[in-house]
Image (spheres, coloured by chain):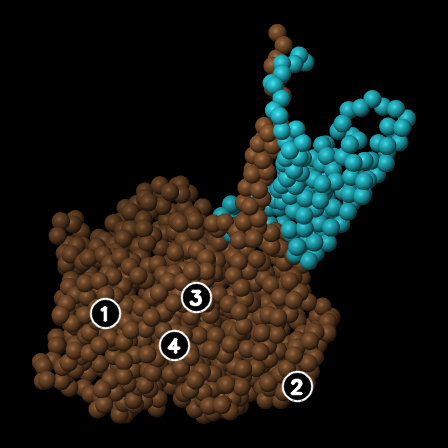
Amino acid sequence: MDTQSLTGQLPGRRTTATGADTATRGRTWVRVLAVAAAGVVLDWGGNQLGWWWVTVLTGVAAALLLRGRALAVFTLAVPLLSWGGELFRLWTAMDTTRISRVTLGLAGVGDDVAWLGYVVTLLYAVLLCAAGVWVAAAARQVIRAARAARHNPIEQEEARTDV
Amino acid sequence: MSPMRRKLTPRGRLGLHSASLVGALALAVVVLQVSVAGAGTLPPLGAAVNPGTGVWVTADQGNPPHDQNLTLPGLSGGATVSFEADGTAHIAAGTDADMYRALGYTHARFRLFEMDLARRQAEGRLAETTSDPAALTSDEYELDLGLLRAAQRDWNAMAPGSPARAVLTEYAQGVNAAVAQLKQDNALPLYYKLMDFPVEQWTPVDSLAVQRLETQTLSFDPLPTAFSYIAGAFGEQKFEQLYHAVGQNPQYPYDPGPYRKLPLTPIPARDDGTPAPPSGTTGGGGTVQQAPAGGAAPPDGFAVGTSPQAIEASAQFQDRLAQLPANAVHTIGNSNAWVVSGKHTASGKPILASDPHLNLTVPSIWYQVELRSPGYQLAGVTVPGIPAVLDGKNQHISWGLTNSQRPGTFYYLEKTDAAHPDQYFWNGQWRPMTKIVNKIGQHDGSTVEYTTRMTVHGPVMTVQGVTAAVWFTGTLPSDNFDSMLAVEKATSFDQFRQALRGWNTPAQNFAYADDAGNIGIANAGLQAQTPDRCLPWLPMSGTGECDVTGSIPFEALPSTYNPPSGFAQTANQREVGTDYPYYYGRGYDFFDQGWRSTEITKALTGTTGVTSQQMQDLQMSMVDDVARALLPTVLKDLEAGSWDPVQTQALEALKNWDYTLTADSAAATVWGRFMVLYGYAVWHPVWQQYKIPAPPRDVFTPRTNDSTYAVDGLNGLLINLSIGDVGNPLFAPPGSTTHTAPEVIRQAFASAVTDLQGKRGPDVRSWKLGDNHKVMIASLLQSPVLDLGPFASGGSGRTINSVVSAAPVRHGKPLTGVAVGGASWRMVVDWGTGQSVGIYPGGQSENPASPWYSDRLADWFAGRNRPILEGESALAATKGRTWTLNP
């Protein structure tokens, strides 16, 4: 996959718009949405099998495929859509609120804050994804920085720049 | 001014990104750790909360079943499980074995966690499920007591071809088939997901252990240790004066005699790790010689039982008990069962009414079923984990159980000294204690070693300062399953009673009524005897003089069959009169005082045309027999007083009262408060005079906030004195302004009204008993979110519809005024109409998201029993909710 096309021309990068840029941006959006959709499907499928860790892996994959705001949106939206969507489906079909109350009650949090069960679950999903994203992004940056340091071992002078 | 910006060098950038990576990895490790292994009280979050397989999906598993074909491996043919709208299960199979396998399967599908928790408690394995320190305390206690050792011994002793062995095996395989299916379908109860412990295979030993746990709940009695305080302080003479062997209120034993004195039967060898006595004796679990070795003088039993050593041992033991789950100790004795002959019923055939009172839990201890196979046709309630209908009927007979409160727990103070470590002096010699090293698994995967020490009397329960061992009938060999299988097949009272011959423990009364018109009650269970000079209701000497000498023979146990009165009742009262020729326990510290027994007797005496509905109403009776006996005298005494307007209102309420302790009754509120303060006024000075110490779990000392066990035990005496000996010195304690019973009564009444007015205002009509008197159906995990209630309630331990037991603890605080014990199941069987009804609080499912979690509660509260359907009538009621089980 041409990751440069995804990583170099993301909506988060401010560039001067041209006709070619617009087309590229359109393709980029399509790919971003495709990655997000794939993430949602993978997370949801993993959940059906009890593979909660798939959410971490999709975060890792997203960090390799996306950059900037797209990655941030992915980190938030994909877990919320995949986990939240399934939660919503369950909520419409059965008494998940009772389960939430029981779970929180047994955890000693209280039995009158059922909404917290949903919130904690979704935050946890985002955290899983974010953990994967951060690890992969940081690893990628370390690799890039290591290459740069190897190719340009002479340290540059500190420069004073006006902004 | 322009800001400075440092441009990082490549190495600097590398360092920065490396730090970021370290941070990312740290976060990932933490997240994964919590996700995989949990943290503190948190379960592994990944498995627990993901919406595909975590706790959320357990909501779906609470939905009632529908027509479905399921596989149950091992069936020889087919079986069906059909469910009524309230979840009552009707199990039918082509063979007995298939029926019991299907029962195991059904129990596990609806109550797996409850069963698992029960076996773990019984087997000393609770600590594997939680990091709560109380679990480890419970495990140590259970491993000392030895329910698991007893269960393993029972299983090993079962003949290969015995019916009980076959039933337990089939049942266990049914449970395991359900477990496998639940695992495969990711449908294990949510508690497993939250508490993070695995489900293990069910074994027949587990069923035996669960049965032993019920035995412990019903018969492990700490009262002899507690009574060492009070008896020692009073002294023997005063103690006997206050606490007669039987209650001082009217007694109605169902077997009034005449009695036969037959030779004692041997106690079966315990064979559970207890040291075997030397040849020539059969001590400990068995029958021992009566004369002390070496010709030692017989001990003064009273002095031994109330000695400083006894009190020290008792204190240690009480401390230990205080940390245990509520069901670890026998605290409730409030079951009722009665049978009415067809000569007195409207239907012309007998009626049986049964309401066993236990800790009220959700999920309930009971699971209601109908079982049909070639060999069995049963309806009633089972205990999940135990393949037997314990309270119910077959096609010809019905039965209901009450606890026989007679003592099954003896305490021995072992003689030890520093020169003989881990030894005890018994029958003239120092003997080594047997040590059993237990390994207790903990929730974090580690294990703790715990050593159980045993003397010839049983496990040592305290070692600090003084060594005390406990001789517990509940761990003796007992063929309960064979007995229950025979009971379930019995068609006559003779067969019924013979079936109970092998029932050694717990001691129970089995009420009986059949379709042929016969009624009866049979008592079953061993009753250990000690030499006459010993006092088994207090801690005894462990040096050999007071060892158990045998048991009351089965033929001499109480029973009644078609009594001339036309009815028989058992309500935890002493089943025999004072001339019964064996040690049978003492009224004050083992048996119910007999108030419920009296109420039932009064209700049934001379009645004709009795209907099932009348018996159901009687089960709901909240009439206080103490009020019935004492209130007329109290009212007469109060007439002589001068009262302010509020007191006058309260007095009027009492005058118009029907002695019924309903939740909305103002009179019951006044009466309850008055009785507490009246008892306090009379008995508190006595406690002070004799300097009675307060044991750690004080159930004796008179107090002003509520009544206590020992004060309740004196109600019979108090009534007698209030009516017939109004000038007794008890009513004129030193320093008091009162001199007679009427004066104390007036003072207590005034105090009661003043107290109530201060708390509830001046309008007496607004005072409600239920405002400060509640009942709660307590969850097994002791969590408010799973509890049902507390609800305002009437009744008391003295009323037929009783509400009893100590305040539960939630969030570390006791819920004052909240009871968690009562009628765990109510059943009435009318053999004339063929109609049977029953109800228990809670529901058939342990899943809190299931409509069957608590759907029976409202009916239970209101006394609305539900039909117990059988055969064809059940078929119509279960349409669309049938599992067809195939091999």
What residue sits 16% from the left and 82% below the top? B427
SS type, badge 1: strand
Q: Secondary structure beneath disc 2?
A: loop
Distance from the alpha carbon under mark 4 to that under mark 1: 20 Å
Quadrant the C terminus of chain B occupies: bottom right
Q: Chain of mark 2?
A: B
Residue B10 sits in which quadrant?
Answer: top right
Circle 2 sits on which residue? B76
Instruction: Residue B301: give x, y in percent of width and height.
Output: 15, 74
Label drawn at residue B468? 1
Residue B271 showing in the rendered view: yes
Which chain has been coloured cyan in this picture?
A
**Same chain check for tags 4 and 1:** yes
The Cα atoms of the two marked residues, 1 and 3, are separated by 24 Å
Q: Which label's residue is closer to the chain start, 4 or 2? A: 2
Cα separation, mark 2 vs mark 3, equals 34 Å
Q: Quadrant of residue A113?
A: top right
Colour representing chain B: brown
Q: Secondary structure at mark 3?
A: loop
State which chain disc 4 sits on: B
Amino acid type, residue under disc 4 in the picture: Arg
- Please give the residue where the numbered disc 4 appears in the rendered image: B149
Say whether mark 3 and mark 1 are on the same chain: yes
Q: Is residue A81 above or below residue B351?
A: above
Mark 2 or mark 3: name the one nearer the start of the chain. Answer: 2
- Give percent across and percent down for residue A161: 65, 14
Q: Nearer the viewer, mark 4 or mark 1?
A: 4
Q: Position of residue B610 (x, y in %)?
A: 51, 77
The answer to whether residue B335 of the structure is visible from this angle is no
Sequence order check, earlier mark of 1 and 2: 2
Quadrant where the N terminus of chain B sits is top right
**Residue nearest the observer in this picture, B665 or B712:** B712
